[in-house]
């Protein structure tokens, strides 16, 4: 606390000895300030380790302009999975809004490192020809004494906010990759079904002409027309799916109209790797790197620190000290001190202590359950990835080559006049399922790999909606 005692009414002066406690408090709290990077250097490090790209906070109009120019440069080339992630991180305003939560958390941290403002009161009473003026300057002594504990607690919550910002970034990157692979696969299938529909129309037209010439039965003609009708329906569904996945990709990348017009998708999915990616000790890596586990551990530590703070302030939750100056008409000034303390008559802090203990137990149980869930998610995602890779390789090495050999043999028979054009077309129809399933299997491989990487990083194996609402655990007890 500090003292400010007036010598004359309305003419206060500072006494050096009395100001010493105030100067000491200012030295303790004056260093609490905002960091130049706003805490984003740690966030970028977390995201770079998990997705290979840093966070891209935009805290000014210049940052927005730079980001838009970078997006335009990336859109000038055909999109890839990596460039889709980069565009999403630069362009998604919802992610930038979530980044603002980190700024609020830093403001709370800085506030926790500063002493509460002193209170000043002045009163005037008059009666019987006497005027009495009272002045008081009061400081929160308990807040000063518990300042280190309070700041450490808030530092844990700030670290949680950093982990949450990194988790939001990883989740959006995962969603961008999934949307990219779905959009490319849907576009590839739409192009293939366009070719199928054109072939079906040609086959149906040929059947009609041969039927008019009397060289084709009505039943055979109807079969060709039915195939053509099915091909048209499949094409409509494929085009709608391509449109829907492209719109999902546009939404995930937060593309505006001019940006969406520049969007170029590759003609086909990336080729299947020669061998599956290795994820040695995936469960152990997940326990070390998952961002949700990082948050759970920070929450458990914050709950422990909150419990310590509650124990220290269980009986006395409010302690103010200050100085007073009183002057009455015709009498010398009277100086004094005052102490305001909460009397634990009806509540000795047992309720606050019980709540803090329950919060700590809750945080510990949540951490233990999160570790169990993380292991299960990684095991499931790893099994799905290996299955998807094996299926994609099966279609690449077995099914598609076999269908091609059959098609080549049918073409030789047709050229040798050993097979009719309709037999050739019938064989082409049988290839539709194999080609479609091959493309879908390749898409499933890339999405399964993305989900596994997300499960290890902590975005979740299912990669749910990006930027889901979050909650902050282990809040500081009221009254501190």
Image (tube, grey):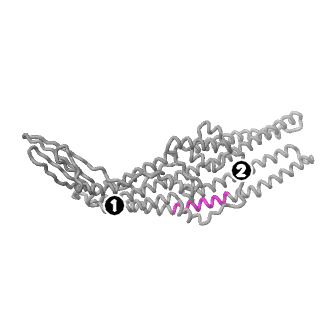
User: Which segment did they paint magenta?
Assistant: 372-388
Q: To which residue does mark 1 refer?
A: 309
Disc 1 + disc 2, Cβ < 8 Å: no
Q: Residue at x 63, y 58 (%)?
A: 384
Quick one: quadrant of the N terminus?
A: bottom left
Tell me, yes or no, whether the highlighted magenta stretch contains residue 74.
Answer: no
Q: Residues within 10 Å of mark 2 (few under 14, many from 20)?
A: many
Residue located at (38% from left, 54% from top)? 32
Q: Foreground mark, 1 or 2?
A: 1
Instruction: Give me the residue at 37% from left, 57% from top.
Output: 151
Instruction: Please tell me which residue is depicted at 70% across the width and 52% down the height of the picture.
Output: 270
Asked if the stretch drawn in magenta spans residue 379, the answer is yes
Quadrant position of residue 52: bottom right
Give the vertical position of 71 relative to 397 (above or below).
above
> CA–CA distance between discs 1 and 2?
59 Å
What is the count of numbered marks?
2
Locate residue 165 relative to residue 323 in the image: left or right: right
Q: Main secondary structure of the magenta part?
A: helix
Residue 134 image point, x, y percent: 17, 46
**176 left or right of 350?**
right
Which residue position is annotated with label 2?
439
Please say whether residue 296 is visible from this viewpoint: yes
Camera-side residue of 261 and 455:
261
Please provide percent x and percent y for residue 77: 68, 44
Q: Nearer the viewer, residue 6 or 349?
A: 6
Residue 87 lies, in percent from the top left, at 60, 46
């Amino acid at each position: 606390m500090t003292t400010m005692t007036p010598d004359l009414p309305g003419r206060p002066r500072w006494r050096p000895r009395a100001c010493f406690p105030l100067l000491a408090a200012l030295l303790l709290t004056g260093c609490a300030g905002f960091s130049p990077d706003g805490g984003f250097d740690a966030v970028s490090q977390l995201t770079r380790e998990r997705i290979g790209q840093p966070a891209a906070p935009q805290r000014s109009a210049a940052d927005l302009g730079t980001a838009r120019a970078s997006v335009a440069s990336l859109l000038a080339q055909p999109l890839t999975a990596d460039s889709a992630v980069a565009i999403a991180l630069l362009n998604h305003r919802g992610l930038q809004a979530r980044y603002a939560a980190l700024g609020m958390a830093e403001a709370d941290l800085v506030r926790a490192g500063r002493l509460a403002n002193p209170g000043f009161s002045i009163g005037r009473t008059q009666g019987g020809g006497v005027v009495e003026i009272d002045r008081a300057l009061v400081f929160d002594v308990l807040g000063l004494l518990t300042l280190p504990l309070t700041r450490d607690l808030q530092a844990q919550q700030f670290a949680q906010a950093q982990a949450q910002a990194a988790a939001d970034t990883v989740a959006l990157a995962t969603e961008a990759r999934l949307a990219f692979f779905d959009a490319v696969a849907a576009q590839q299938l739409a192009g293939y079904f366009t070719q199928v529909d054109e072939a079906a129309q040609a086959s149906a037209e040929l059947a009609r002409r041969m039927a008019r010439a009397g060289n084709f039965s009505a039943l055979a003609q109807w079969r060709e027309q039915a195939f053509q009708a099915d091909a048209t329906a499949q094409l409509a569904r494929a085009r709608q799916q391509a449109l829907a996945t492209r719109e999902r990709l546009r939404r995930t990348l937060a593309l505006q109209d001019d940006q969406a017009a520049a969007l170029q998708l590759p003609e086909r999915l990336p080729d299947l790797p020669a061998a599956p990616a290795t994820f040695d000790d995936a469960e152990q890596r997940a326990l070390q790197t998952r961002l949700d586990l990082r948050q759970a551990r920070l929450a458990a530590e914050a709950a422990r620190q909150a419990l310590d703070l509650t124990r220290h302030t269980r009986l006395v939750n409010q302690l103010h000290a200050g100085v007073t100056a009183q002057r009455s008409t015709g009498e010398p000034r009277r100086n004094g001190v005052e102490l305001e303390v909460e009397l634990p008559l009806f509540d000795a802090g047992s309720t606050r202590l019980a709540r803090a203990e329950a919060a700590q137990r809750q945080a510990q149980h949540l951490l233990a359950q999160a570790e169990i869930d993380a292991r299960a998610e990684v095991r499931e995602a790893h099994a799905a990835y290996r299955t998807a890779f094996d299926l994609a390789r099966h279609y690449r090495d077995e099914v598609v080559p076999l269908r091609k050999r059959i098609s080549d043999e049918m073409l030789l028979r047709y050229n040798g006049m050993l097979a009719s054009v309709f037999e050739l077309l019938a064989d082409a129809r049988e290839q539709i399922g194999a080609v479609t399933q091959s493309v879908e299997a390749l898409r499933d491989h890339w999405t399964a790999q993305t989900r596994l990487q997300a499960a290890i990083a902590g975005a979740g194996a299912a990669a749910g909606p990006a930027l889901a609402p979050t909650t902050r655990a282990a809040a500081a007890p009221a009254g501190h």
